[in-house]
Image (tube, rainbow, N blue to C red):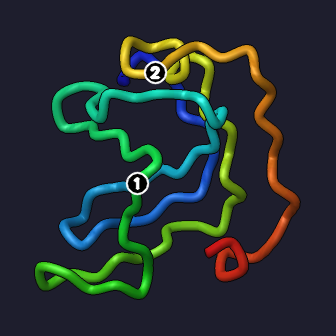
């Protein structure tokens, strides 16, 4: 991942001070759950969101960016499938309206 740029996207700090970067992907994309050591991919599942508290820490939004389209390198990685299906950006809304 150090060789790839991440687009600006909605980001959350986890209860253990990890980072969650949220991306949109084509509906049929598949990911194996692990991008590399220390980097999990949650797809077609769920994550806890602010204001959740777990393990003594709180989930907190780090910005109010729109959710970006997953970068091409992620979709074409061995963890994902390359897609020719278009992924469109959602209309602008506040963070609370998204969830």
Quarter occupied by residue 10: bottom right
Residue behind mark 2? 80
Quarter occupied by residue 45: bottom left
Disc 2 crowd, CA 10 A, few/some/many (<14, 14-19, 20+):
many
In primary-sequence order, the first of circles 1 and 2 is 1
Q: How many marks?
A: 2
31 w.r.t. 10: above or below: above
Dot 2 falls on a residue whose secondary structure is loop
Tag of residue 23: none
Across and down, in percent, residue 87 comes to: 77, 34
Q: Residue 69's x, y, as percent?
A: 68, 38
Point 41% across, 77% down: residue: 60
Residue visible at 41% across and 87% down in the picture = 51
Q: Which quadrant is the C terminus positioned in?
A: bottom right
Disc 1 to disc 2, C-alpha distance = 15 Å
Q: Is residue 45 above or below residue 79?
A: below
**Residue 56 place in picture, x, y as percent:** 13, 85
The furthest residue to the right: 91
Q: Secondary structure at mark 1?
A: loop
User: Is residue 48 placed above or below 42 in the rendered structure?
Assistant: below
Q: Residue furthest front?
A: 28
Q: Is residue 65 found left or right of 91 in the rendered image?
A: left
Task: Check the image and report above or below for 59 versus 3.
Answer: below
Q: Is residue 44 left or right of residue 83?
A: left
**Where's the N terminus, which quadrant?**
top left
Residue visible at 52% across and 13% down? 76
Q: Quadrant of residue 46?
A: bottom left
Instruction: Tell me the crowding category of disc 1: few under 14, some 14 to 19, or many 20 or more residues within 10 angstroms, Cα based.
Output: few
For residue 45, the mark is 1
Q: Is residue 69 left or right of residue 75?
A: right
| Residue mark closest to the camera, 1 vs 2 | 1
Where is residue 43 drawn, in percent x and y?
44, 44
């Amino acid at each position: 991942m150090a060789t790839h740029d991440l687009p600006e996207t909605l980001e959350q700090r986890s209860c253990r001070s990890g980072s969650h970067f949220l991306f949109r992907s084509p509906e049929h994309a598949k990911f194996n759950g692990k991008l590399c050591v220390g980097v999990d991919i949650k797809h077609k599942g769920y994550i806890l969101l602010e204001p959740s508290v777990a393990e003594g820490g709180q989930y907190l939004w780090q910005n109010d960016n729109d959710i970006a389209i997953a970068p091409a390198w992620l979709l074409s990685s061995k963890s994902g499938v390359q897609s020719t299906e278009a992924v469109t950006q959602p209309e602008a809304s506040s963070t609370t309206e998204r969830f």
